[in-house]
Image (cartoon, coloured by chain):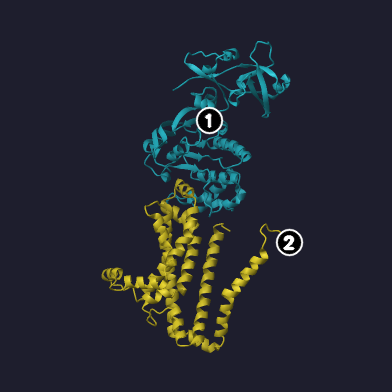
Chain colours: A cyan, B yellow
């Protein structure tokens, strides 16, 4: 185990930021700490780094208890949301910083440092910018330089705090893939914080979902998406339709195929792509109206309204492939039939 | 001129700038120059090379440089404390910094002299512990000039420090830098240009300071007599050309020193990529 956290708690005044967090992260993983803002994910990352002290609990990195160690002794690389590049230094000097501040007997010669910095610059594909100052770079370039700077000291753990948070959408998409490939190449245990579930799914090998300072679920992207541990995770990861059996007075949910197997189950979460929409076959089927649809690229999102329920919260979202939608040749206002292929059931917790 | 700028008003603002410069700076200065020109070159040199004049120049510039240096260090520490740490009474303390700006300098001089004279509250203690007399010595001038110059440094460093991203310091620590290395390599280079500006302001103010200095300096010719006092003395003796000659020399030396400080500063900024 590369990173072991046991019973980490942290309080800011009356606010409980982290509530007894325990977490094991294996060597070489790329882990996303995912959660809504204020869930404690950045605080947890900063505690692992040593930039913040936990009120209680222990942090072990590579088997060593580093709870009492300051950040400079923890052998970590930290990448900040707003880059935190040294603005008075060139790109080259920024990356060389960690190598030049080493104690004299461990310090490499300037020629070795020179070679190493240029290797890192090539790794992040920005060698041509070595003599620029941070202010002359774009956001995406700055973040890659910040990453190169963190990697220069060969950290045993790489920690990234919302690394793509300040970038625009297209740069963010490129950098996500790039980060994954880089991780594949270097294989250094990494944790990044994000509030974007899509980003977590796309980049991470393991996702830790946090809410109100507690871990809701830990698992691979598939486990999190296909088998959410509770209704928070299900709602937070991807889009979902929520059906409550208590509100099913007419019993029409049963006709959609929503039948609980466990007597305690009451809330059903249904992913949009688990709803099958077809042309109505019989007159008795419950009337459902196709209110609107949007083109999302490869899929079409349908907004369905059960007849007589016009309130926006009763809208059901379904998704189907583009081709299928064209085959059905549906129009706005058409009556349709729908069937639920799969649902996640949750009991109501008081 | 084609209208390429978003903000109009080049002509009125430039006009005002030139008018102001002429009225307040250039005309008085050229009047001074003209007055000095009544002296022959030999007379001019004779006035300036008088031993008492040279001594006062050494004292004025020496004490101003020393005081500005000390004020730069102390002001830096005060600005750091005010920006970085919360403590009770911070707002009050912050307001106190500007007091030397508002206080009549003569009042400051009298207060400082009373405190630092050999029988004064502070002067007595210093005298007993180290045997050094502060007031009525060049050291007294330094004390007065530190008092006058300190707010310049604090007020120039403070806003820059407020804007300094603390994440840079965290980044330095995460890369293995000690606190001392972080201070020397990250914090100081970012604050140095502002500190030098504060130093230059404190120095310029100190060289010309009259009111507070004369009460604490003792004003002994050759020992603790500053240039502004010498000018006043000349004026009182109706030696107007002599006074303007000294004034002109002082102006030139100050201007050259400030030019030097400014170019040092812009070199620092250029090196730090802040242009």
Percent across and percent down for residue A289 are: 66, 20
* A86 or B96, nearer to the observer: B96
Answer with left or right where residue A255 lies relative to residue B183: right
Image quadrant occupied by the C terminus of chain B: bottom right
Q: Quadrant of residue A66?
A: top left
Percent across and percent down for residue A140 are: 59, 44
The relative height of residue A138 versus residue B143 in the rendered view (above or below) is: above
Residue beneath disc 1: A205
Residue B195 is tagged as none
Say which residue appears at 39% left-offset and 35% top-offset. Answer: A9
Percent across and percent down for residue B249 are: 51, 80
Count of labels in the image: 2
Chain letter of the residue carrying label 1: A
The relative height of residue B234 versus residue A95 in the rendered view (above or below) is: below
The relative height of residue A13 versus residue A344 in the rendered view (above or below) is: below
* A270 or A289, nearer to the observer: A289
The relative height of residue B219 versus residue A232 in the rendered view (above or below) is: below
**Element type at marker 1?**
loop
Q: Quadrant of residue B101?
A: bottom left
Residue sitting at the far left: B128
Say which residue appears at 38% left-offset and 42% top-offset. Answer: A69
Q: Is residue A143 visible?
A: yes
Crowd rating for badge 1 (residues with CA inside 10 Å; few <14, some 14–19, many 20+): some
**Element type at marker 2?**
loop
Percent across and percent down for residue B238 are: 47, 88
Image quadrant occupied by the N terminus of chain B: bottom right
Work out whether disc 2 and disc 1 sit on a shared chain: no
Answer with left or right where residue A331 lies relative to residue A215: right
Crowd rating for badge 2 (residues with CA inside 10 Å; few <14, some 14–19, many 20+): few
* A40 or B54, nearer to the observer: A40
Residue B2 is tagged as 2
Chain letter of the residue carrying label 2: B
């Amino acid at each position: 185990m590369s990173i072991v956290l046991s019973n980490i708690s942290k309080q800011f005044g009356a606010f409980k930021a982290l509530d007894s967090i325990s977490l094991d992260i294996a060597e070489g993983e790329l882990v996303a700490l995912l959660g809504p803002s204020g869930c404690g994910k950045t605080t947890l990352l900063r505690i692992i780094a040593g930039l913040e002290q936990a009120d209680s609990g222990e942090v072990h990195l590579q088997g060593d208890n580093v709870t009492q160690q300051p950040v400079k002794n923890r052998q970590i690389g930290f990448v900040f949301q707003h880059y935190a590049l040294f603005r008075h230094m060139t790109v080259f000097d920024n990356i060389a910083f960690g190598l030049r501040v080493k104690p004299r007997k461990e310090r490499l010669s300037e020629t070795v440092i020179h070679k190493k910095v240029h290797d890192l610059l090539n790794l992040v594909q920005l060698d041509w910018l070595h003599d620029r100052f941070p202010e002359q770079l774009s956001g995406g370039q700055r973040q890659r330089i910040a990453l190169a700077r963190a990697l220069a000291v060969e950290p045993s753990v790489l920690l990234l705090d919302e690394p793509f948070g300040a970038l625009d959408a297209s740069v963010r998409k490129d950098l996500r893939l790039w980060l994954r490939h880089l991780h594949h190449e270097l294989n250094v245990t990494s944790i990044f914080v994000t509030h974007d579930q899509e980003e977590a799914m796309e980049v991470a090998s393991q996702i830790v979902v946090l809410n109100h300072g507690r871990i809701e679920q830990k698992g691979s992207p598939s486990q999190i998406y296909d088998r959410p541990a509770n209704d928070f995770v299900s709602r937070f990861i991807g889009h979902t339709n929520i059906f409550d059996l208590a509100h099913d007075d007419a019993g029409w949910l049963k006709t959609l195929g929503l039948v609980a197997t466990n007597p305690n189950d009451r809330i059903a979460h249904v992913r949009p792509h688990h709803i099958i929409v077809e042309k109505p076959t019989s007159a008795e089927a419950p009337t459902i109206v196709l209110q609107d649809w949007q083109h999302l690229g490869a899929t079409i999102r349908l907004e369905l309204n059960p007849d007589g329920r016009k309130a926006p919260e009763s809208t059901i979202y379904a998704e189907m492939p583009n081709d299928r939608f064209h085959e059905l040749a549906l129009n706005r206002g058409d009556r349709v039939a729908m069937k639920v292929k799969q649902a996640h059931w949750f009991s109501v917790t008081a | 001129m084609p209208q390429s700028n978003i903000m109009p008003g080049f002509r009125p603002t430039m006009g005002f700038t030139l008018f102001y410069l002429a009225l307040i700076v250039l005309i008085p200065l050229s009047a001074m120059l003209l007055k000095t020109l009544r002296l022959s070159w030999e007379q001019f040199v004779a006035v300036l090379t008088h031993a008492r004049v040279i001594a006062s120049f050494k004292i004025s510039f020496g004490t101003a440089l020393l005081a500005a240096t000390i004020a730069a260090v102390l002001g830096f520490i005060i600005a750091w404390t005010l920006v970085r740490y919360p403590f009770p009474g911070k707002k009050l303390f912050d307001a106190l910094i500007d007091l030397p700006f508002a206080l009549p300098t003569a009042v400051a001089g009298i207060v400082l002299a009373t405190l630092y004279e050999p029988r004064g509250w502070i002067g007595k203690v210093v005298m007993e512990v180290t045997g050094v007399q502060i007031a009525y010595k060049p050291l007294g001038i330094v004390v007065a000039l530190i008092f006058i110059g300190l707010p310049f440094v604090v007020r120039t460093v403070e806003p820059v420090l407020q804007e300094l991203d603390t994440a840079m310091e965290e980044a330095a620590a995460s890369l293995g830098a000690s606190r001392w290395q972080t201070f020397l390599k990250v914090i100081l280079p970012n604050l140095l240009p502002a500190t030098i500006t504060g130093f230059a302001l404190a120095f310029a103010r100190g060289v010309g300071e009259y009111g507070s200095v004369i009460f604490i300096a003792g004003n002994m010719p050759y020992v603790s007599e500053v240039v502004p006092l010498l000018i006043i003395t000349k004026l009182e003796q109706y030696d107007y050309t002599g006074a303007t000659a000294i004034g002109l020399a002082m102006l030139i030396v100050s201007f050259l020193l400030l030019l030097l400080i400014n170019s040092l500063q812009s070199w620092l900024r250029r090196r730090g990529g802040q242009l």
